[in-house]
Image: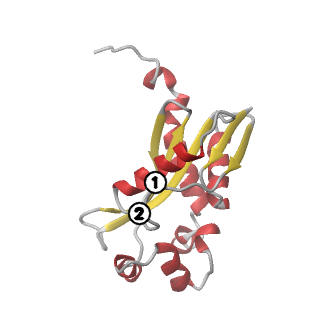
Amino acid sequence: MVKVVVGSKNPVKVEGVRQAFLQYFDEVEVSSREVDSGVGSQPFNDDSIKGAINRALNSYSEEFDFSVGVEAGLFSVKRTITGFIDFQVSAIYDGSRISVGFGPGFEYPPLVVEEVLKGKEVGDVMDEFTGIENLGEKTGAIHFLTKGKISRTDLTRLSVTTALIPWINGEYYFDMEKKF
């Protein structure tokens, strides 16, 4: 039995983590804890990575095999419509080592990004934009924007899956002697 704790009470994040771990482990027990990300409520760029790492570190205790932090944030990307792409970032910690992974990125509508740049949180703006309360704790903005083809759970699962790469390939990441 692999015991995992998620540094968030958001049910979408918890379910995405559960799905990712079940791809590689037969028995998984997932718990959740509300922890401080150590970054602002609307992270940009590297703060998104820091937030995921902090969530993983702050939720860990020795009763778990892994702790997972998930943070969505806007990254500055040139040659895009708005100049920003939203990515889910995941960090996995085992008490001594940490890995980071990203999910697929997508762009919010320009009107949403304009409001976020004025200081509002993406979640609040998307709730207003869509008329769906607490969208981020349900199917997410991505579900609305892809007309139901991709959910926030999917983004979280993929983000955690990419963060799991070093753990499921330990011989290439943690146990490998210097070959070059």
Q: Is 175 placed above or below 93 here?
A: above
Per the image, the residue denoted by label 2 is: 43
- Residue 74, labelled with which disc? none
Please identify the quarter of the rendering in which residue 66 is found: top right
Q: Quadrant location of the N terminus?
A: top right
For the point 53% across and 56% down, which residue is it?
36
Whether residue 10 is visible, yes or no, is yes
Per the image, the residue denoted by label 1 is: 51
For the point 31% across and 73% down, which residue is it?
82
Say which element carries label 2. Answer: loop
Q: CA distance from mark 1 to mark 2?
A: 8 Å
Ranked by sequence position, the earlier of labels 1 and 2 is 2
Q: The disc labelled 1 sits on which kind of residue?
A: Gly
Say which element carries label 1. Answer: helix
Q: Are marks 1 and 2 in contact (CB under 8 Å)?
A: yes
Image x and y of residue 117, in percent: 34, 76
Q: The disc labelled 2 sits on which kind of residue?
A: Pro
- Packing grade of label 1 (10 A; few <14, some 14-19, many >=20) is many
Q: Is 139 placed above or below 131 here?
A: above
Farthest residue to the left: give it. 78
Whether residue 139 is visible, yes or no, is no
Image x and y of residue 115, in percent: 39, 82
Please identify the quarter of the rendering in which residue 39 is found: bottom left
